[in-house]
């Protein structure tokens, strides 16, 4: 049995000791390791299997960590982690106390830039390249971006900026023709065209010319001349942006990758390398179904990942079912997703209503303004979006939707803690950043049935609205089939007590009810964060010695802050405690454990109340 190469690699310096001929064997070992490791921990498998050779080649050729590798999204960095001293740590990937599933500057000097959200890499790498220029350093910056991430406006803002500089920035486009689901849009069509036979052959020739040390400026001039003559040259789009386009090359051929990168490293000016890879490469089930293997839980590598079926529905499924039912009831409804068809529960809707379904790519900002335009003309858009990704579309929500009071509905999934993805993906802030926007209706359901009813309420509302619900399932409440709205701005008292009133929002109504079992407590399910049920607050304030607000959102500026403002406006001075997420970024871990660590499980809530009650005057 030959010695395994991987076991001797604790840093890229070890990697660089290998002969080029050894690299394919290393790639095979890495794939084996990845499948076995992710099967134990869960994680983003398919993207990582696709970038094994590219990662090896980048670390082999570039002088990391001096040279900076900036990974876009960062969900494809497992090989990078393994090669940079974290092979053993992969056993704790995405688990409490273990390494993160994304690059983290605090985790390793090789993680040049933190990520989790997409399409930031070119901007960040450009900033680094400019910094090296300012500092007189010969270090290099490389952005590695996927074809999905490339669909975002931010990527093009960065290309626009970078292409007008002389900086030796390298952008590597990792084109696997997939986002999480199949990639969409005109850019995707364009990349497919580049890949088609005619262009592929021509592109290879163009690439060879560049690599045979033709000064890039002359190459650009040549191509400009060809363009003037009306000849269509491969890579035109990226060249028009001022980059030297090279490729497409085979992203699984280590010889080609190493040679190409070695040559590019000598070139000056912005470089764009188009690399073609296969998502899931080397593990047949993932190659066949890269979407299912994009992000996986623990699984048996021999059996593969099972498609989910049965069990109590998640909030995502509740939303997806509601969307189909509401679409049947109202032909004006359209559904929009910024590249999260599966995660947001839109698969059935996309199949049943293909003409009313819009995957706009990773383009949250565009999704909101596109929805605003639709709403202007009487169409009723529902934008399904993760809380964390809505952050990117804030100005569009304020300026294009809310300011014009347009009936755009947001179905906000992953609100609150998400667990293994950690702070980049936690939906900790939406209540804080939505609450201050005029015209917004904001609802937070406490169970699946209330979710369905609040979705209907928001949809029927003639103005901007948001319903936020957490990752995973709820209490397993029976879901009524109808489409009945609830009264806007009205909460409901779920339990009567005398000492303390637990004023709970959304996912914390359940823990509040459980905590109340050991307390003399009332529990209010507020249902709406905006407008708040001020009458209910007044009643609760009059009838209890202590008020406690509860939310799975940052305490800072959240629903509880809204309660405090409302009580102050009513002139009511009642002892008030706010329970919610702390003013810190919480690391990845088990979501239930994390909630308990924040004191937001039943025991923590009861503890917080007892700490205050003895101190209160009778
Ligand atoms: C701003 C933002 N929106 C959405 C996502 C969710 N997301 C993570 S990976 C991904 C697909 C990325 O596709 P690509 O860049 O081609 O990488 P691949 O998965 O194919 O390796 C999406 C939509 C995200 N991380 N960030
Ligand atoms: C990398 C990324 O942004 C997504 O793949 C994300 O991890 C999906 O999260 P969910 O598993 O909650 O859908
Ligand atoms: Mg892709």
Image (tube, rainbow, N blue to C red):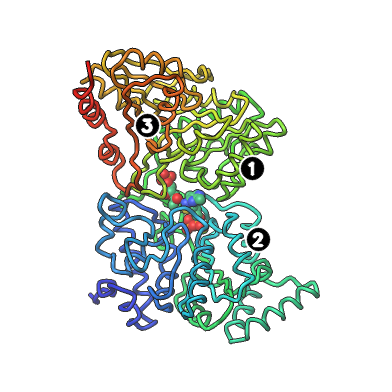
Q: Which residue is mark 3?
A: 551
Vertical side of 76 occupied by 180: above or below: above
Kindly identify which numbered label has been placed on residue 190: 2
Task: Locate residue 354, reporting x and y percent.
Answer: 62, 39
Q: Which circle's residue, 1 or 3, is located before the other in the chain? A: 1
What secondary structure is found at the residue carrying circle 2? Answer: helix
Residue placed most toward the observer, 315 or 532: 532
The image quadrant of residue 541 is top left
Q: Is residue 332 left or right of residue 475?
A: right
- Badge 2: how crowded within 10 Å, few (<14), some, or many (20+)? few
Q: Is residue 611 left or right of residue 438?
A: left
Q: Which residue is mark 1?
A: 369
Q: Residue at x 52, y 76 (%)?
A: 133
Label 2 vs label 3: CA separation? 45 Å
> Nearer the viewer's eye, disc 2 or disc 3?
3
What secondary structure is found at the residue carrying circle 1? Answer: helix
Q: Is mark 3 within 8 Å of ligand 2?
A: no
What secondary structure is found at the residue carrying circle 3? Answer: strand
């Amino acid at each position: 049995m030959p010695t395994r190469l991987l076991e001797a690699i604790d840093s890229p310096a070890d990697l660089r000791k290998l002969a080029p001929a050894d690299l394919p064997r290393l790639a095979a070992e890495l794939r084996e390791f990845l499948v076995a490791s992710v099967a134990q921990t869960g994680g983003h498998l398919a993207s990582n299997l696709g970038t094994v050779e590219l990662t090896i080649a980048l670390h082999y050729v570039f002088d990391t960590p001096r040279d900076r590798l900036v990974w876009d999204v960062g969900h494809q960095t497992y090989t990078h982690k393994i090669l940079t001293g974290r092979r053993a740590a992969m056993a704790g990937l995405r688990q409490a106390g273990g390494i993160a599933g994304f690059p983290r500057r605090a985790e390793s000097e090789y993680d040049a830039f933190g990520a989790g959200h997409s399409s930031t890499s070119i901007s960040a790498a450009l900033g680094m390249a400019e910094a090296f220029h300012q500092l007189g350093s010969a270090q290099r910056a490389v952005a590695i971006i996927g074809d999905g991430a490339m669909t975002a406006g931010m990527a093009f803002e960065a290309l626009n900026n970078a292409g007008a500089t002389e900086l030796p920035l390298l952008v590597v486009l990792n084109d696997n023709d997939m986002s999480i689901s199949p990639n969409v849009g005109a850019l995707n069509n364009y990349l497919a065209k580049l890949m088609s036979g005619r262009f592929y052959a021509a592109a290879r020739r163009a690439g060879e010319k560049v690599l045979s040390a033709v000064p890039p400026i002359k190459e650009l001039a040549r191509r400009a001349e060809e363009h003037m003559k009306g000849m269509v040259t491969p890579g035109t789009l990226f060249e028009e942006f001022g980059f030297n386009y090279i490729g497409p090359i085979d992203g699984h051929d280590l010889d080609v990758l190493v040679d190409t990168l070695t040559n590019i490293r000598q070139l000056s000016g912005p470089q764009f390398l188009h690399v073609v890879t296969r998502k899931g490469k080397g593990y047949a089930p993932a190659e066949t179904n890269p979407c299912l293997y994009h992000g996986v839980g623990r699984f048996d590598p021999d059996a593969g990942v099972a498609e989910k079926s049965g069990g109590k529905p998640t909030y995502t499924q509740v939303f997806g079912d509601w969307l189909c039912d509401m679409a049947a009831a109202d032909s004006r409804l359209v559904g929009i997703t910024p590249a999260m068809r599966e995660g947001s529960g839109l698969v059935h809707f996309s199949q049943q209503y293909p003409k009313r379904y819009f995957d706009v790519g990773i383009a949250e900002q565009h999704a909101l303004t596109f929805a605003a335009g639709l709403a202007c003309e009487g169409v009723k858009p529902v934008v399904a979006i993760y809380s964390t990704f809505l952050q990117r579309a804030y100005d569009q929500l304020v300026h294009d939707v809310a300011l014009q009071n347009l009936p755009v509905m947001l179905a906000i999934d992953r609100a609150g803690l998400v667990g293994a993805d950690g702070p980049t993906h936690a939906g900790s802030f939406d209540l804080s950043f939505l609450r201050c926007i005029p015209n917004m209706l904001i609802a937070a359901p406490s169970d699946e049935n209330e979710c369905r009813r609040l979705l209907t309420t928001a949809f029927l509302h003639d103005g901007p609205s948001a319903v936020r619900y957490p990752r995973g399932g709820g209490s397993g409440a029976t879901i009524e089939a109808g489409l009945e709205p609830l009264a806007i701005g009205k909460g409901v008292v779920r339990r009567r007590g005398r000492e303390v009133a637990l004023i709970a929002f959304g996912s914390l109504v359940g823990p509040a009810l459980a905590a109340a079992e050991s307390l003399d407590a009332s529990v209010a399910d507020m249902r709406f964060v905006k407008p708040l049920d001020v009458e209910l607050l007044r009643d609760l304030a009059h009838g209890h010695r202590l008020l406690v607000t509860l939310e799975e959102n940052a305490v800072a500026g959240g629903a509880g802050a809204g309660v405090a403002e409302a009580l102050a406006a009513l002139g009511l001075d009642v002892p008030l405690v706010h329970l919610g997420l702390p003013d810190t970024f919480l690391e990845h871990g088990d979501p239930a454990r994390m909630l308990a660590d924040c004191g937001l499980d039943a025991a923590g809530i009861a503890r917080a109340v007892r700490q205050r009650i003895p101190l209160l005057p009778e």
